[in-house]
Image (tube, helix red, strand yellow):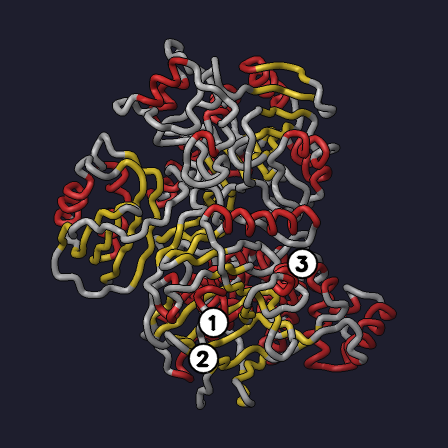
Amino acid sequence: MVERLKITIRGAVQGVGFRPFIFRLANELNLKGFVLNSSKGIFIEVEGQTDKLKEFIIRIEKEKPPISIIQSFEYSFLDAVGYDEFIIKKSEKDEEITALILPDIATCQDCLRELFDPKDRRYLYPFINCTNCGPRFTIIEMLPYDRPLTSMKNFQMCSHCKEEYHNPLDRRFHAQPIACPVCGPQIELWDANGRIIALKQNAINQTCALIKSGKIIAIKGLGGFHLVVDATNDEAIIQLRKRKQREEKPFALMFPDLNMIKNYCEVSELEERPLKSSEAPIVLLKKKDNLSETNLSKFIAPGNPYLGIMLPYTPLHHILMNLLKKPVVATSGNLSEEPICIDEYDALKRLKGIADFFLVHNRPILRHCDDSIVRIIKGREFIIRRARGYAPLPFLIDGANGIDDENIIAVGGHLKNTISIKKKNQVFISQHIGDLSTFESFNAFKKTINDFKSLYELNKVTYVGDLHPDYLSTKYLKEQKNEYRLIQHHLAHVAACKLENQLKGEALGVSWDGTGFGYDGKIWGSEFFYIDDENYAHLGQFKKFSLPSGEKAIREPKRTLAGVLFEIFGDHILNNNLLLKKFSHTELKLIVDLIKKKINSPDCVSAGRLFDAVSSLIGIADYSNFEGQAAMKLEWAISESTNDHYEFEFIKENKVIIDWSRIISGLIDDLEKGKSQSELSGKFHNTLTEIIVEFAKKFNLKKVLLSGGCFQNIYLLNRTIDRLKEESFQPYWHQRIPTNDGGISFGQIAAFYLKEKQVDF
């Protein structure tokens, strides 16, 4: 299959033979397209067979010119446009350059060599950096990026650092965070009351000893604090879960090196690339079958076939991991639903009772930035959380939908919140902010908006937000004395996918997730849209059911199941043996009364909630300890391959309603026949895929966009992609923009000028 690969590279890649290198490599692999040098970086577009494009990605970083430095490498697969040769395009000179703030960049190899060289004056100095690595986004106050405008301004350079900083031939020429043990930031180890226990290297040595003894350490890093414990110590991890109020949600891990990761997980070349990259995200990797035989704690990711793993990305991490020589849990330094702590004194208060000790430093962090999360899907990077290493790099748009001259601030949704700003033809997406359900989170949200307005000098702006009247982001937007527009949640998902894939013309948009406010006031989340370059139309959704007790049903999928079964069987569920195993008769009668009287039992058409109901129905999860857990467990239950699916029905009203009643009845029949959870889950997932395929056939829209949190489900996404291709449709999914609500702010900008139209069917 011929595809187009679009790559953006930033760093020391101009004037070092990079374009001729790309030209030679492209021709060797028989790829067509171009390479272009610009003030914003090097842009490459190549077309060819998919396997050759993947080889191209890997070989660029392995074989690049020796003196070149890649600080950011982002790529996307797009539709081919028909290049007939490979050329070096003439360099572009922008009329107006919008200054870019680079993300925080992982420690480079040159600095690592110095870090562990006993003869080097920065030996074991945890803040070593150069022009090619180190903090950027988290230390800059405002543009331009000069030392007096960063959090390093109070550290006066010593004569040696000053000489390096002003020497154009030195690797640290104009490295704004430049520092050394004489003049730079320092490390301290504190107890839980903020009393200093140890300094400098002694603090690091003692920290390692404390980790090995089972203590929980809050470590101040690049964009905030990590909570760190020994990943082989069950008791320490159980204690961390208890203190952090995080019962089962997986913890991220940091490993000393790649070879050790390969002892625990399967790692492909395309998965190895981001692990070792300048972005250094958490990468979701498949556990090896024999993992239970290793010393890794089973409490890290209970029941989860994947582990979220990263390599050290700061000098401090490298020193710690070099001493520990074992994996550690490195989870965000916060309480559930709160933003990550960035200040040591704030951390002492907010992490009190969680951390036993604090490893801190005196370089201020100006803005929080969590670790990014990626995984590889169909040979493509799939960003789940876009933060450190990626934010706030812009996404270039081509001026579609008439938004060239409009400055826009998009405030996103409520969960996994990000904000985005559009300035000319660039959309800058913020770091992950999180769920806006706490005072701290909402303050971080407002701070980020003001931060971006200041950094990018936005004066007159138009705001755009979510249609949901109760989202704090929407309430904030309405309080501003500016023009604003509200975009329906699932339309934003679809528009984000279309714009990211640079797709022109009409398409079918499929937007499935847990919750979103519909035009009719119902809880949506199973939406089908027609979308083209100027218009959209809502084509269909699932049949409704009730969510008894509202938000409580999201935490207790068995309640959602009761709502689903009531829609089919009515009052007869009072005698339903399956439900009577989950509720007392009194509880069940109360639930029926809530539904019938419509008391705190909103109508729902959400695919995500249907996943929850099925998870409860077949005995996998009656409760969810974190968002999406019941649906995730349902996916993980699939262990055997099947092509079977259940029957379903399309009902034509003012839009197409997908009746799922036969799906649920089929599941109940199979359950009574004693079929396995694996087979039941597989058939249910396959049925959802067939719904999408049949919907595409019904409207004969050949291009199909897949967006929304449900498409983090890898079985569903992979099978849907495969089935659509089998039926001669062209599927599109997210790569650089999160498919979950982290992509909503980008989608609000993408949908800004779309107009509703009527579609006959």
Residue lying at 14% horizontally and 54% vertically, measured from the top left = 86
Q: Residue furthest right?
A: 586
Q: Say whether residue 670 is visible.
A: no
Label 3 element class? loop
Residue lying at 66% horizontally and 59% vertically, measured from the top left = 472
Q: Which of labels 3 and 2 is toward the front? A: 2
Label 1 element class? strand
Residue 355 drawn at (x, y percent)? 69, 30
CA gap, disc 2 and disc 1: 10 Å
- Relative placement, left or right, of 345 versus 655 is right
Near mark 3 (Cα within 10 A), the count class, few <14, some 14-19 or many ≥20, is many
> Which image quadrant for residue 296?
top right
Q: Which mark is residue 510?
A: 1
Q: Report the quarter where the N terminus lies.
A: bottom left
Residue lying at 72% horizontally and 63% vertically, measured from the top left = 551
- Relative placement, left or right, of 39 versus 646 is left
Residue lying at 47% horizontally and 60% vertically, measured from the top left = 746
Q: From the image, tell me which residue sits under label 3.
A: 621
- The three-letter code of the residue at mark 2 reads Phe
CA gap, disc 3 and disc 1: 26 Å
- The three-letter code of the residue at mark 3 reads Ala
Tag 2 near tag 1, CB within 8 Å: yes
Q: From the image, tell me which residue sits under label 2.
A: 695
Residue 72 drawn at (x, y percent)? 35, 42
- The three-letter code of the residue at mark 1 reads Val
